[in-house]
Image (spheres, grey):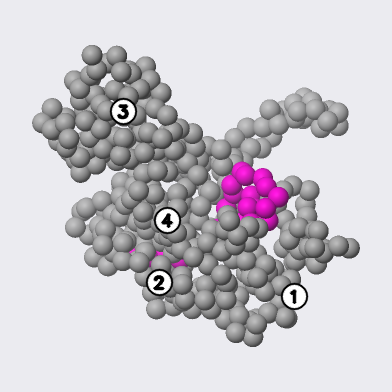
Amino acid sequence: MCEACDSFLDRMFAKGVLHATGVDGLYGRGASFEAVVDGLDRLITRLASDDAAEVIRFPPGMNRALFEKSGYMKNFPQLAGTVHSFDGNEKDHMALLDAIHNGGAWTQGQAATDIVLTPAACYPLYPIVARRGPLTPEGALFDVQSYCFRHEPSKDPARMQMFRMREFVRIGAPEQAASFRERWLDRARDFAERLELPHHIDVANDPFFGRAGKMMASSQRDQALKFELLVPIESVEKPTACQSFNYHQDHFGSLWGIETSSGETAHTACVGFGMERLTLALFKHHGLDTDGWPKSVRAALTL
Amino acid sequence: MLATIRRLVEEQGRLSAAADTLRDDADLYASGLTSFAAVQLMLALEEAFDVEFPERMLNRRSFASIAAIASCIAELKPEEVA
């Protein structure tokens, strides 16, 4: 087999690091891949160990009604995924089986359930915080994680459709949210250096949909609301965002009615780790065999 | 044209001050124009003036003041200025 002419993704399949499913962006994970994800999780936990964040882990689906209220469909309709289930009688079931048997369309009879696929790990968090009432003067800090879905099939292994996102979310006064993000921007450099990954941090924007989205994206960049830690994976010219640092101002606070102890609308900020992307970056830069990785990197990941 | 823009800023901008108290060059963002409200304003302006803002105008600066909006409209529709 010619290693040089196979893509990074093909080589990971050949090594059993990832397993193909027949759908771009949807892969099984092998033992070595998961060991690195676990190592990253431990390293991130250590970085944040003094912060005493409240831990919440979410399933890959969220409440559809809360998703609708979140406004995600305003900005990213192209990325969202909904969960539908069969909702018919026996006759409908027969028609459904016939359609599948004949290779025809069979999903039109499916009805929306109360669940949509979680688009970002912090989305299910805000309504939980809002339900608790006003914040304490210290504000709140959470450590959340979820499998997330984004409908963007691609051969780029770093653009998965289902992937894990770990996030720290700070909710409080504007200066609390802003200083949280500054602290994580500093930590990110240390984090990438410990992993011995080539990287830089740059201003970024979310992939807002359509012409209105162009304005949202430009506005987000002008105000430097989003930064990303970029690591070359598939391309040096277009490095991959492995971590993001977001200041939402009062967007989520006002949407969900989250108040500070003094009755002001809370500001929020989050730092997100793309667990699969960070893992892929490590395999890309240190090789497909984790036993051969630099001792220092293996130590950082406690492998 | 300025009166129409001012009316749309009032209707769509959700500002902390009434639009007719704002100078033409007053910073609308400083008066509470959010990114979301700016998008609504952009769409309302397109409908009212029957224009389509090109991509290069779809940014924060184009909608930063009543005067900035007027100069965009004037560029897209020179006859409005007359």
Alpha carbon separation for disc pair 1 and 4: 33 Å
Mark nearest the camera among 3 and 2 is 3
Chain of the residue where label 2 is placed in the rendered structure: A
Q: Amino acid at mark 1?
A: Asp
The extreme left residue here reads B21
Magenta region:
A139-165
Residue A230, percent from left and from top: 52, 61
Magenta stretch encompasses residue A83: no
Q: Residues within 10 Å of mark 1 (few under 14, many from 20)?
A: few
Look at 27% across and 67% down and name the residue there.
A138
Q: Are marks 3 and 1 in contact (CB under 8 Å)?
A: no
The residue under label 4 is: A203
Q: Which mark is residue A289?
A: 1
Which disc number belongs to residue B72? 3
- Mark nearer the viewer, 1 or 4: 4
Q: Quadrant of residue A94?
A: top right
Give me the residue at 50% from left, 40% from top. A76
Report the quarter where the N terminus of chain A lies: bottom right
| Tag 3: amino acid | Cys
Which part of the image, by quadrant, shows the C terminus of chain A? bottom right
Report the amino acid beneath label 4: Val
Kindly report the distance in space between the C-alpha atoms of the residues bearing marks 4 and 3. Answer: 27 Å
Query: How far is mark 3 from mark 1, CA to CA?
Result: 57 Å
Query: How far is disc 2 from disc 1 in space, using C-alphas?
Result: 30 Å
Question: Which is in the foreground here, disc 2 or disc 4?
Answer: 4
